[in-house]
Amino acid sequence: MTTEHTTATREAWLAARLDLLKAEKEYTRRGDALAQQRQELPWVRVDKTYRFETDEGSATLVDLFKGRSQLLVYHFMFGPDYKAGCPSCSSIADSFEGVVVHLANHDVTLMAVSRAPLAKLRAYKDRMGWTFPWASAPGGDFNFDFNVSFTEEQQREGTVEYNYQRGGHAMDATPVPQPVAEFAATCGTDAPTYARERPGISAFVLEDGVVYHTYSTYARGVDGVWGMYQWLDRAPKGRNETGVWWRRHDEYAKSAAQSRG
């Protein structure tokens, strides 16, 4: 059986690869410039007091820094009424274990934050085998102020503003897209409840006892920390997606067994 993909000699492949290398280097330089532009954003002072529940007890936003000057928050989709964390957020968080210690030794704390009660987060961490820090923000305005949680009223009135725009996100669509319904079911909830939480990353800095918000990104903006996609983008067939294919890492074996049965 022959492949339908273009084939070539090694010499022709090398010529094509060198052309691609030029484009890759330009992409890298553009990424460096974007990183610099990101770091040059103005800082916004955070004066509101936020409270969190952590393994060390009740904490403020300053406490989440754990003595470091920089804080990266991953807004993990795990609402108060979820029975399990979002599968997509879970696949992203699988990579946290390997990098959190390196960031900690470079003056950066990586912390996941969700609205689910701490007991649920602890149980889910045990299930997933994770040890990275994860704080609960069950009440207060933190998730709402940083645009990753929304109310039933906002959903009903169509006033959800996510990723710096109103509407246009798959979770806001009617009828509910099949992937959203699937993910909601795996979290033990319905689609509207599931969609009241959204993924994102927010960055903060602490200087002279004052916290500043420096950056936030949402939706496809979190792709850069989604480890499996960075690898798939370098695989021969790329992302090669026709629907929702990923699972929580402890569900693949069960899925395979069910398909064989």
Image (cartoon, grey):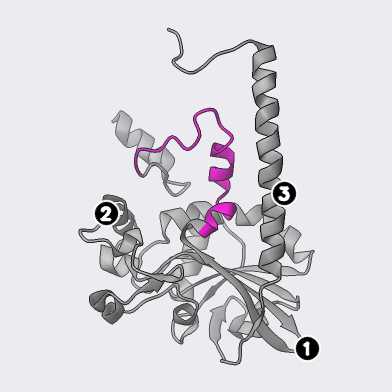
Quarter-of-image position of residue 196: bottom left
Q: CA distance from mark 1 to mark 2?
A: 47 Å
- The C terminus - image quarter: top left
Is residue 112 in view from this perspective?
yes
Determine which residue is flagged by label 1. 208
Which marked residue is nearer to the observer: mark 3 or mark 1?
A: 3
Q: Which mark is residue 29?
A: 3
Residue 100 at least partly seen: no
Mark 2: which amino acid? Pro
Give the position of the N terminus as an image quadrant: top left
- Residue at 54% x, 81% y is 53
Residue wearing tag 2: 177
Towards the viewer: 62 or 30: 30
Tell me if mark 1 has few (under 14), some (14-19) or many (20+) residues whose alpha carbon lies within 10 angstroms of its own. few
Task: Using the image as rendered, state which of residue 254 and residue 110 is in the foreground.
Answer: 110
Magenta-highlighted residues: 221-243
Name the disc covering residue 231, or none: none
Picture quadrant where residue 138 is located? bottom left
Q: x%, y% of residue 92?
A: 53, 54
2 or 3: mark nearer the eye: 3
